[in-house]
Image (cartoon, grey):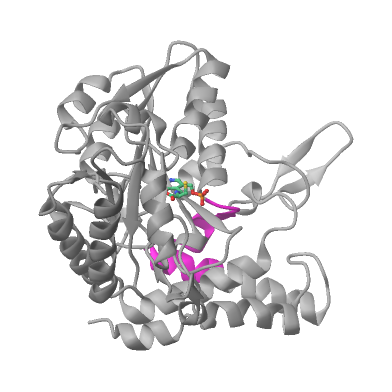
Amino acid sequence: MIDVKAVRADFPILERKVNGRPLVYLDSGATSQKPRQVIEAVARFYREHNANVHRGLYQLAAEATDLYEEARAKVARFIGAAPEEIVFTHGTTEALNLAAYSLGELLVGEGDEVVVTAMEHHANLIPWQQLARRKGARLVPVGVTPEGELDLGELAEAISDRTKVVAAVHVSNVLGTINPVPEIAELAHKVGAVVVVDAAQSVPHLPVSVRELGADLLAFSGHKMLGPTGIGVLWGRKELLEKLPPFLTGGEMIREVWLDRATWNDVPYKFEAGTPPVAQAVGLGAAVDYLSSLGMEEVRRHDLELTARTLEGLLERDYVTVYGPTEPEARGGVVAFNLRGIHPHDVATLLDQEGIAIRAGHHCAQPLHRLLGIPASCRVSFYVYNTPEEVDTFLSALDRVWEALG
Ligand code: C6P
C-alpha cells in the first residue's frame, strides 16, 4: 500500500495554498507534479555534471553521457524493453509524429489504410491524417460503444489487407477506458499491420510490459509520470526501428556525411538528432526510480481506489453525467463528467476558487467530444499523492457549484 502521507511530503508544491486554500491537484492527466528526488536529480545534473553527450573527450562529457545512457536503461527496464529500443524524444507528441512519418516512408502508399480510433488524442490522430494526405492513403476510424469502450467488432471489420498501421490509445485521456492492446495487436498482426500505441496515460499509471502488450511502437511522456517536461519516449521493436528511416535529421543521428548524402547511426541514435534533452532524461530516470520504489502494482491500486470513490460520488449525483465505463477496473485514473446545463469552464473556475485544480475543455480530443455530443467536459485525474479526502473535498465543492449555478 502507498504511504500517501510520506509520498506527499516529497512534493514541495503540495505545501502551497491556492486562493487561500490548500492545493487539491486533480489534473495529473495533464501533467503530474514532481517529487524533490526528480527536482534534485535535474538540479544536480546542472550543478555537477552538465556537458553535451556522446561528443566530448573529457571527464564531464563522459559523466553526462553515462547519466543519459543510465536513464535510458532505467526506462527500458521499467517497460520490459532493451535500452537500444528506447528513443528519447521531447514527448509523446513528437514520438507519435516520428512513428507516423517514418512508418509512412517505410510502408504506406497510395490506397493503403491506417486504422485509428475515435477516442484518440489529437497527437495520435493528426500525424496519421497528415500521412494519409501525403501518401494518398485512407484513414479508417473505429467507433466507441455507448459504454465508452472501443468497438472491437467494428475494429475487426475495419482491418483489411489494405491496413498498414493500426494506431490506438492505451488509456483514453477522456473516457479513462483501458483498451485491450493485446487483442488489437492480434487483429492487426493477422494482416501484417504495424501497431502503434499511445501510452501517454498508461505507462505512468499501470504496470506496462511492452512484450505482453504485443505492440510494435509505443509512445509516452516523462512529465505525466513525475518526470520533467521536454522528455518523452518512443519504444520500438529493434527490428522495426532498424528498418525505419529517420524523422529529424542533423547532428548525432549520422554515421558519415558527404556534401551530397549521409548514412545513419545505429538505433536508437538514428532517431535522436541534435543535442538531446539530457537533464530531462536524467530527471525521468529519477522519476522511474521513484515509481519503481512505490511499485507500479501499488500505483495502480491507489489510482483504482480514488477512481472508484470518485465514480461512486459522481454517479449518485443526479445533476452529473459521467463519460466512459462505470466500472473502475475498466479505467485508468481519469474521470470526465459534466454538470447539467453548466459550462465546464464555469465548474473549473468555481472549483479553483476553493483551491481545487481540474481540467475543463476538449482535452485535445475533439472528435471524441463530438461523438459524445458535447463541446467540452470537466475532468479530474489522480496520481500517487492524491488522497480519498481530496476526492471528498472535490465532491462537496461540486455540490456548491451546483447550488450556485444549477
Ligand atoms: N494529454 C491531457 O490533459 P504530450 O503533450 O506530447 O506530452 O502528450 C500528448 C498526449 C498524447 N496522448 C494522450 C492520451 C494524452 O493524454 C496526451 C496529453 C494531456 O489529457 C494534455 S492535452
Q: Position of residue 227 (x, y in %)?
A: 52, 68
Q: Position of residue 98 (x, y in %)?
A: 56, 40
Whether residue 215 can be seen here: no
Image quarter in which the C terminus is found = top left
User: In this view of the protein, which residue sits in the foreground, 342 or 193?
Assistant: 342
Instruction: Say left or right for 211 vs 323.
Output: right
What is the count of numbered marks? 0
106 displayed left or right of 140: right
Q: Where is the N terminus found, in terms of image quarters?
A: bottom left
Q: Quadrant of residue 43?
A: bottom right
Q: In x, y percent, where is residue 405?
A: 30, 47
Residue 55 on the magenta segment:
no
- Name the spot of residue 323 as percent of width and height, x first: 22, 42
Q: Nearer the viewer, residue 110 or 344?
A: 344
The answer to whether 61 appears left or right of 1 in the picture is right
From what the image shows, is residue 64 above or below residue 216?
below
Write the residue at 26% across / 56% down: 332
Instruction: Decide: is 261 above or below 131.
Output: below
Q: Nearer the viewer, residue 387 or 59?
A: 387
From which residue to which does the magenta span run?
A: 72-91
Dividing the picture into quadrants, the one containing residue 283 is bottom right
Between 51 and 17, the one nearer to me in the picture: 17
Q: Residue furthest right?
A: 259
x 74%, y 65%: residue: 54
User: Which residue is rendered at x = 86% and y = 31% of the image?
Assistant: 260
The answer to whether residue 44 is visible is: yes
